[in-house]
Amino acid sequence: MSFSLIWKLGMVALVVGTIFFLSYIYPNIKMPKWRRKIISAKYLRDRQHFDLADQVLEGAMKEFPDAIPVYHVYYQYYSTPEDMKRIYDVFARGYEKTHDAGLGVMMAKMLVEEGDVDKAADLLESAGAQEFMLTRNLPIKAQLYYRQGKLEQAEKEYLDFYKKLYPDAQNEKEIFSDFQPDELIFLALIRWELKKDWRSIVSCLPVKSIMEDDDWLSLYQKLKEDQPKLAVKTGVYGPAENLLEFRKSEIEKKISFLHEVMKTFM
């Protein structure tokens, strides 16, 4: 092999190596360590290693307790919803350290499920909490009213929430036609329980679709599959049995409602 060819190959390797370094390695060197942890967790999630991804983020939160984005990512993806005390304690420690309104909202969502609506309501009152709920599509105040049995208030809060997000929408179909069934069932279920017109809300989405799984039938089948697998190891701070009973009740109501949907539209 001639010297000139070796030199050219060496230059090509140098250029490729430089591009790789500048594109992948150098940006990560400049990046805060906690953000690199988020990237590592995403890598693990993409490869179905959900428990390892949780561990990476939990380690990052211990090492960098002020790094609020780590908590937000953890909330979005945590993989152990049956162990709610451990999950809740993560956010409670972060909230105590940072007083971040978003962490308060995350705690409130869990407290609503646990039934501690008064403590949850306090965490949702600030302007920061309301902005966080809007930007993250979290109508938790509506869920709080529903948990209290205040169905009319829950319906109004849910509609007001999404009218703020979609101020130019002319009607409910324009607002809700891009929703997932597991999002929209909340409003449909409220109207069903109130003996109001739930059919118009259901009709915003297909009952059965051959193109995709985002239809009411697919949700019905999924809930039926999930029902026998429900498990709770710990409540937020109360008995695990209370939280399990609530989750059983909720999934049973949804299945009953969707059974009515199937009878009506299929």
Image: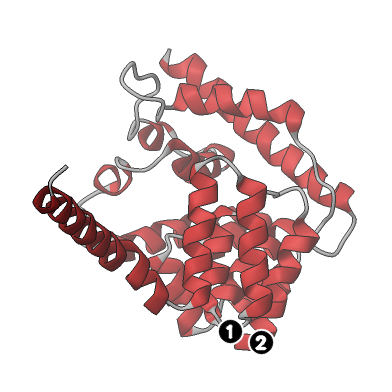
Q: Residues within 10 Å of mark 2 (few under 14, many from 20)?
A: few
Q: Work out which residue is located at the far top of the displayed protein and give it.
A: 266
Q: At label 2, which amino acid type do we have?
A: Lys
Q: Which mark is residue 66?
A: 1
Q: Are marks 2 and 1 in contact (CB under 8 Å)?
A: yes
Q: Work out which residue is located at the far front of the displayed protein and give it.
A: 2
Q: Secondary structure at mark 2?
A: helix
- Marks 2 and 1 sit apart, C-alpha to C-alpha, by 7 Å
Which sits in the foreground, 231 or 242?
A: 231
Q: Which mark is residue 153?
A: none
Q: At label 1, which amino acid type do we have?
A: Asp
User: Which percent across, then down, holds residue 19?
Assistant: 22, 61
Q: Is residue 179 above or below residue 221?
A: below
Q: How is the image coloured?
A: secondary structure
User: Which percent across, then down, holds residue 144?
Assistant: 62, 62
Q: Is residue 122 above or below residue 245?
A: below
Q: Work out which residue is located at the far left of the displayed protein and give it.
A: 4
Q: Is residue 25 left or right of residue 140?
A: left
- Which residue lies under the disc numbered 2? 97
Q: Secondary structure at mark 1?
A: loop
| Observer able to see residue 122 | no
Q: Residues within 10 Å of mark 1 (few under 14, many from 20)?
A: some
